């Protein structure tokens, strides 16, 4: 761990440039911005502040690489081998990347190692198998006049893709998009969130080490309103893939209209976690607490609306609240920490605003709600206790709006049809959970829920092989699995006259 500490200290001690066309460069404007350590509120590192001029340079580099023989003529097997080498270097630097992620985002280092790094490795391993399996078809067409033809399709890379990612799972969200984009043969301009650019910059160094040709992956660090907006609007970008807030998703759709680039979106959620009366109250309580408090509640799938059948409501909520009180809150770099600080001062204001709103609208705090006392050193950190609201009501803001923090709103229910109607009465449709010993009943409810993912007697499981995405305003398209390759490929239909 000591040498990882040293590597991270060395990395943050120098201003970090961006990667464009294989060169590490400053912003054309010469401007920089600071990224902050959420555990202390102090500056962690200084990063180049790219804007539209740097996006122009990066798109030109990606366009050049897309047309280059080194990338275009790389065989599918070789592209697969490259993706395996990327997985290898991420794995080899896993502890260092986890510590860097934890310092920049605030999350527990153990979580960063298991989830952020672990997922990134798995993604590249899974997608390493795909380049050699992107098959087209031969189609039995019926042309007029009995002409004999061969009609076949091929899958071709969509071109230069802009990837805009959020701060909650910085490196793994980048890899969710990078791995399939590279598998399909695209080239990339990647913009990390301004709160958490560091793991992406380190990853970019490792990609070069793994042998990714210059210009195939470019990283522009900068703000959403400038660098992000320029990338979404750029005429030289063929597709943009975005994860973040629904509001920014709308801005991206508007910006993409200029050249009608393809758009895929992973947006917010307000996921219902449903407990039937025959579920084991203690086991469910533990899982329901994990479903909301995982990653400081900063997860688009967070089980933020907990619907427990009235017969077992008090027992379940007493146990959820007891678990919430026991969660060890502390700096992410401490291996004993179970929940770190929120990512930023802005996010802290936003989440604590919802805590106040819940109280004002009449919900009752059963656990948390305040700022834990972690001593002088962490007095400037963005720490919040895991917070449980009971007596929440459907019309309250804490039930309707995405909080994106460790705040649970729990409600008792009596009638299953009314429960399903309430669960579906949301602009979001990302995920849902169902807890019961009656699997038939669980399947029937799953069928009625408007959600891209339904977990039965489990929560927050994802896998590179399984499609993920949202109904309604939770997004467009599906990431991961075979499905995601549709987002990064175009189908070409070729007709050959055989007569
Ligand atoms: P955001 O949507 O503003 O930021 C996500 C990314 O988009 C960042 O890289 C940002 O720089 C970029 N961006 C911002 N404005 C842009 C624009 N106009 N054009 C192009 N790119 C732009 O998210 P946020 O403001 O940091 O967080 C606010 C809320 O977003 C959260 O509270 C939560 O509701 C949601 N969120 C969701 C996810 C998710 O995984 N679904 C992740 C993070 C945040």
Image (tube, rainbow, N blue to C red):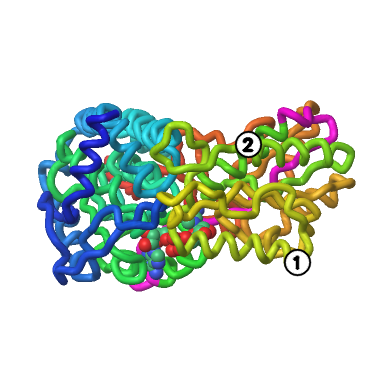
- Point out the frontmost of discs 2 and 1: 2
Up the image or down, 426 lies above or below 410; here it is below
Q: Quadrant of residue 32?
A: bottom left
Residue 14 is at least partly visible in this image: yes
Label 1: how many Cα within 10 Å (few below 14, some 14–19, many 20+): some
C-alpha distance separating marks 2 and 1: 27 Å
Residue 184 placement, left or right of 298 = left
| Quadrant holding the N terminus | top left
Q: Is residue 432 magenta?
A: no
Position of residue 411 relative to residue 182, above or below, is: below
Q: Residue furthest front?
A: 376
The image position of residue 8, as x and y in percent, is 24, 41
Cβ(mark 1) to ligand 1 < 8 Å?
no
- For the question of whether residue 476 can be seen, the reply is no
Q: Quadrant of residue 181?
A: top left
Q: Quadrant of ligand 1?
A: bottom left
Secondary structure beneath dot 2 equals helix
Would you call the spot at circle 2 few (<14 residues within 10 Å), some (14-19), or many (20 or more)? few
Quadrant location, the C terminus: top left
Residue 207 locus on image (x, y percent): 21, 39
Residue located 19% across and 54% down the image: 16
Q: Which residues are magenta?
A: 255-283
Residue at 38%, 71% (x, y): give it.
255
Q: Position of residue 479 (x, y in %)?
A: 45, 44
Where's residue 150, x and y in %? 32, 40
- Residue 326: image tag: 2
Disc 1: which residue: 361
Badge number at residue 84: none
């Amino acid at each position: 761990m000591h040498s990882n500490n040293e590597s991270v200290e060395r990395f943050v001690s120098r201003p970090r440039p961006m990667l464009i066309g294989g060169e590490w460069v400053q912003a054309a404007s010469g401007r920089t911005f600071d990224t902050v350590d959420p555990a202390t509120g102090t500056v962690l590192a200084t990063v180049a502040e790219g804007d539209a001029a740097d996006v122009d340079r990066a798109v030109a580099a990606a366009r050049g690489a897309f047309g280059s023989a080194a990338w275009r003529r790389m065989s599918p097997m070789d592209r697969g081998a490259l993706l395996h080498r990327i997985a290898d270097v991420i794995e080899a630097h896993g502890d260092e990347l986890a510590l860097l992620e934890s310092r920049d985002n605030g999350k527990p280092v153990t979580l960063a190692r298991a989830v952020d790094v672990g997922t990134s490795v798995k993604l590249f391993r899974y997608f390493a198998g795909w380049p050699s399996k992107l098959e087209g078809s031969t189609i039995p067409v019926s042309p007029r006049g009995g002409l004999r033809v061969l009609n076949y399709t091929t899958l071709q890379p969509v071109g230069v893709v802009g990837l805009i990612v959020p701060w909650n799972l910085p490196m793994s969200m980048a890899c969710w998009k990078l791995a399939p984009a590279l598998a399909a043969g695209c080239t990339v301009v990647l913009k990390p969130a301004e709160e958490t650019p560091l793991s992406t910059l380190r990853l970019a160094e490792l990609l070069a080490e793994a042998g990714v040709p210059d210009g195939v992956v470019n990283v522009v660090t900068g703000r959403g309103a400038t660098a992000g907006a320029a990338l979404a609007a750029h005429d030289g970008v063929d597709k943009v893939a975005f994860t973040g807030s629904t509001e920014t998703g709308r801005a991206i759709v508007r910006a993409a209209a200029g050249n009608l680039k393809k758009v895929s979106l992973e947006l917010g959620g307000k996921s219902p976690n449903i407990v039937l009366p025959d579920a084991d109250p203690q086991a469910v309580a533990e899982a329901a607490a994990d479903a909301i408090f995982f990653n400081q509640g900063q997860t688009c799938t967070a089980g933020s609306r907990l619907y427990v059948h009235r017969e077992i409501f008090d027992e379940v909520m007493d146990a959820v609240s007891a678990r919430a009180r026991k969660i060890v809150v502390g700096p992410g770099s401490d291996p004993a920490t179970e929940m770190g600080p929120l990512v930023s001062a802005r996010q802290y204001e936003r989440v604590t605003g919802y805590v106040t709103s819940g109280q004002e609208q009449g919900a009752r705090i059963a656990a948390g709600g305040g700022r834990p006392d972690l001593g002088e050193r962490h007095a400037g950190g963005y720490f919040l206790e895991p917070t449980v609201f009971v007596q929440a009501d459907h019309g309250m803001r804490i039930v309707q709006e995405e909080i994106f923090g460790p705040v649970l709103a729990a409600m008792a229910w009596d009638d299953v049809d009314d429960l399903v109607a309430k669960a579906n009465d949301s602009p979001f449709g990302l995920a849902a959970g169902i807890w019961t010993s009656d699997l038939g009943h669980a399947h029937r409810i799953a069928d009625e829920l408007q959600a891209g993912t339904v977990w039965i007697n489990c929560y927050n499981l994802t896998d590179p092989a399984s499609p993920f995405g949202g109904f309604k305003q939770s997004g467009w398209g599906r990431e991961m699995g075979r499905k995601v390759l549709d987002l990064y490929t175009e189908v070409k239909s070729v007709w050959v006259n055989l007569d």
